[in-house]
Image: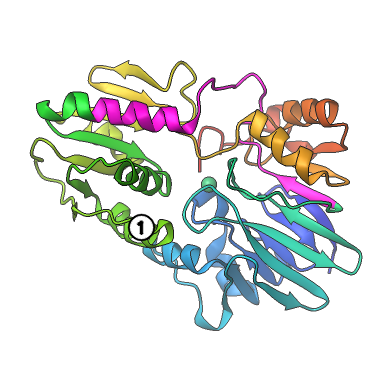
Amino acid sequence: MSCEVGVDKAGAVLLGCSVAADSHRPGRPVRVVTHAHSDHMLGIERSFRESRLIVATPVTMEMMEVLGYRVPHGKAVPLGYGESVGFGDESIMLVESRHIAGSSQVLVETPWGSFGYTGDFKMPGTRPLAGLDALVVDATYGDPRLQRAWGEWDAIAALIEVIERFIAEGPVWVYGYHGKLQEVMAQLRIRGVDYPFKADLTTFRLAEIAARFYGVRLDPIEIYDGGPVDDAIVVFVHSSKLQGYRRRPGMHVRLTGWEMRAPAAVAGERLINVSFSDHASFREIVEYLDYARPRLVLVDAYRGRSAAIAAKYLERILNLRVKASPPAMLGAAQRTVTGYEG
Ligand SMILES: [Zn+2]
């Protein structure tokens, strides 16, 4: 059994000797899934067959099921935040992160060191894993040039403004990725938006799980069957449906962390981008690491398009040892996940 820390070329985050998080690594007996986004469930069917244990929070397990992944019964280890499971002489703990419902960080304690992985996260709301020997960090927005001058609250406020302004003229369609849609639905209800919601079946079923997680009631909400929609309804559908639904009557809103112009910006005829992100900004990554101060920082270069730049700046700003991992991902080999914002 080989022991190492870092991200391999298939996107597996290796922590100690037994754990592979967020992608399959042949020979690693413990597969951890930090959350139910596709770029963190890589090779999951193979892990179901080959791994000994599948570790995730109960909410992530439920969401995986909705998305069509059935964790083999004898292998499932649902772990609440702060709970741990032992494998050999290693201990694996899941720690809360704020990203989507059920998302977690991973902490692995071994006789030769303690290793962590942030998973996807944003600040505040994610407790830094402090004082580790090595920490793998997500830096989807790791490029210091990609700075939004506004916060999440401004993005939600902008979305509410769009809804209030256009809902009398027809439905408002909101497109986003799994998890982000449900978080936004909860935020809207918390802020008193009480128009009826509709959501496609998967979005709806994930929303039921997320509503329990956030402790928010989403009613009135119905399943959207694909037909015509009345005015004064907010419809939530997965981003993949945007092209197909684009010409339907009403206002269309895309939730995207890549919109850097303003909290809300026109992106086409009857199409508005709302700049809502589920990932830490560069400043938030600095904030996390300044508190955590591990002996070695490894920036996930498999999922982050700017890992090399992020590593360079983080090293200078924080006076920590920082490397991109895997190093071969730099430059031309940069792969295809870029643009995905799971
Ligand atoms: Zn994610």
Q: Residue at x 50, y 23 (%)?
A: 150
Residue 256, given in percent of the width and then of the height, sits at 43, 31
Residue 320 located left or right of residue 246 = right
- Seen from the viewer's position, the closer of residues 208 and 300 is 208
Query: Which residue corresponds to the image point at 83% horizontal and 37% vertical from the top-left?
Result: 322
In this rendering, the answer to whether 28 lies above or below 260 is below
Q: Amino acid at mark 1?
A: Ala
| Residue 142 percent location from the top left of the image | 66, 30
Q: Residue at x 37, y 63 (%)?
A: 66
- Judging depth in this view, the residue of 96 and 18 nearest the camera is 96
Q: Residue 181: x, y in percent? A: 36, 44
What segment is highlighted magenta in the picture?
Answer: 134-163
* Rendered view: 331 above or below 139: above
Horizontal relation, residue 30 to residue 176: left or right: right
Location of residue 254 with respect to 195 vertically, above or below: above
In the image shown, does 70 or 299 lie closer to the viewer? 299
